[in-house]
Amino acid sequence: MTFRMRTTLITLGVLFATAIASGVAGWHVGVDSAAGFFADGYMLRNTTDVRTQVAVLQSLRNGQTEKATELLEAYLDGNIIGLSTRNSFSNRTNAAVAEAIQKTKDYRSNYPRHTSIQEIDMGVDRVLQNTPIKESQP
């Protein structure tokens, strides 16, 4: 093997190893960034849940059942509107979402609710009036 050929092979080997190392490092950074992003979202959701639950509990303990009910109704509205993206989830999740929507439809047929904010009412109505999700066969 000539010196030139050996130098070329070594250079190609170093370039190949560098490319693999860069790919692994990039993948690791990407995974860490994505995990941090989703963990932050999860924690923010939990903090909202905790604050709402504490407010409801305080209202109930103070005998303010109407205020507690309104807090829960508003919280339900927000969660229902959040379910409007349900078509992008798996069939298993879609079945759970469809069940949650049906339970809310049943509840709201007995206890109708309208807010002073038209966009919220429209968002809730849009989800509750949507057709049920059809599960595909595996």
Image: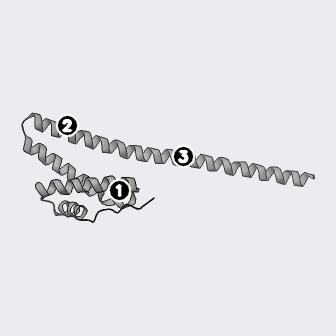
- Residue highlighted by disc 1: 94
- Residue highlighted by disc 2: 54
* Three-letter amino acid code of the residue under disc 1: Asn
Q: Name the residue located 21 percent from the left edge and 51 percent from the top edge.
A: 76
The answer to whether residue 19 shows anywhere in this view is yes
In front of the other: 42 or 6: 42
* Three-letter amino acid code of the residue under disc 3: Val
> Which quarter of the rendered picture does the C terminus lie within?
bottom left
- Please tell me which of labels 1 and 2 falls first in the chain: 2
Which of pointers 2 and 3 indicates the residue nearer the eye?
2
Q: Could you tell me if the residues under marks 1 and 2 are in contact, i.e. CB atoms within 8 Å?
A: no
Q: Could you tell me if the residues under marks 2 and 3 are in contact, i.e. CB atoms within 8 Å?
A: no
* Three-letter amino acid code of the residue under disc 2: Val
In front of the other: 105 or 20: 105
Q: Name the residue located 18 percent from the left edge and 51 percent from the top edge.
A: 74
- Please tell me which of labels 2 and 3 falls first in the chain: 3
Location of residue 50 by image quarter: top left
Question: Residue 68 in the image: x percent, y percent?
Answer: 12, 43
In front of the other: 7 or 91: 91
- Residue highlighted by disc 3: 29
**Inter-mark Cα distance, 2 to 3:** 37 Å
Q: Name the residue located 39 percent from the left edge and 60 percent from the top edge.
A: 88
